[in-house]
Amino acid sequence: MSASHIFQALDSVQLESRPIHLAIGMFDGLHLGHQSVIEAAIHSARRSGGLAGVLTFWPHPSRLFRPENPTPQIMNPDDKVAMLLELGLDFAVVHPFSEHFASMDADGFLPFVRSCLPDLHSVYVGENWRFGRGRSGDVRQLVEQGRSEEITVFSAPRVNLNGKPISSTRIRQHLIRGEMAEANELLGYSYFARGEVHPGRQLGRKFGVPTLNLDWRSELRPAFGVYAVRVGLDGSRERVEGIANFGLRPTVEAESDQPVLEVHLLGDCPWGVGDELRVEWWDFIRPEQKFDDLVSLRSQIQKDIDLLRARSSG
């Protein structure tokens, strides 16, 4: 997918004239349940010679309706689009969830989408998806609208794991507790951070543990602590094992409310300032803590590295 096939609003979409098969949803985290909806649209498009696309939204509706307590998102829009590219879609639309859009009657939703996408052939949603002002529309109403618009509507059943539906809420709970194995199982891939390496204070280099500092921000903050990670250039499949600290660095920072992601590679480091990296988190080692001095911090970091090396070779 080229950059020209990523659109920031429905009314800005420009595509060649082919039948469009569209998956619709917030899709925060793009977990296994979301992937089942999207893959159905891709399969239909490939079978019929059409185009497969996604309509998603930003910001989350809670930013509008509960600004004092919004739902933190697992993914930012750029990360979501990056992963949509990997799934094999032909285009993606990240439509603004504004007051005007939120006030649209449910009866007007599908006609609005059709007016922006005249070649819309079919729509794919999760079985519990809601839409329209006050979330008044449901799948049954969407099916009725589809009949009048000559658009086929498919609703995918929720995907269960260990007897419970996979949901973004479950994943958020695991991430804030540092339960990476459980979160990754629900996601169907390794939770990741993407960002550019930027200059740090090089404190790690001074005591033999050089780190890559990533410019990464996330609404949802995983548990502060030390993680086992795999690192590679964004867009490449090659990975190098490493250890990462995500948190406020209380031993070296007097006061800070902005967490930092620092990564130390177990092998030689081929990257530096300016490189765009993808850091995949796969295990939680320990919570972040404040040490009395840098000597104690260095000793603990070495223990963390030794533990990770032992796990990797075991």
Image (cartoon, rainbow, N blue to C red):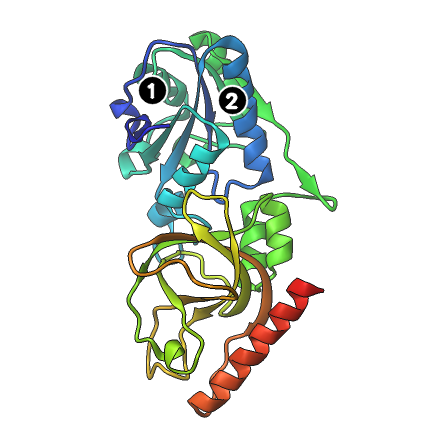
- For mark 2, does the 10 Å Cα neighbourhood hold few (<14), some (14 to 19), or many (20 or more) residues? many
| Residue 135 horizontal/vertical position (percent) | 45, 34
- Asked if labels 1 and 2 touch by Cβ distance under 8 angstroms, the answer is no
- Viewer-closest of 297 and 123: 297
Screen quadrant of the N terminus? top left
- Viewer-closest of 69 and 17: 17
Q: Earlier in the sequence, mark 2 or mark 1?
A: 2
| Residue 63 horizontal/vertical position (percent) | 35, 49
**Residue at the spot of label 1:** 112
* Disc sitting over residue 143 in the figure: none
270, above or below 78, in the image: below
- Viewer-closest of 145 and 250: 250
Screen quadrant of the C terminus? bottom right
Residue at point 57%, 64% (across, down)? 177
102, above or below 152, in the image: below
Q: Amino acid at mark 2?
A: Ile
Mark 2 against mark 1, which lies toward the viewer? 2
275, above or below 156, in the image: below
- For mark 1, does the 10 Å Cα neighbourhood hold few (<14), some (14 to 19), or many (20 or more) residues? few
Q: Amino acid at mark 1?
A: Phe
| Residue 5 horizontal/vertical position (percent) | 32, 26
Q: Residue furthest left?
A: 12
Residue at point 53%, 54% (across, down)? 172
| Image position of 165 (left or right of 224) | right
Q: Quadrant of residue 270?
A: bottom left
Number of numbered labels in the structure image = 2
| Residue 40 horizontal/vertical position (percent) | 56, 23
**Residue at the spot of label 2:** 42
Residue at point 49%, 32% (across, down)? 87
Q: Quadrant of residue 140?
A: top right
> Does residue 128 appear in the picture of this structure?
no
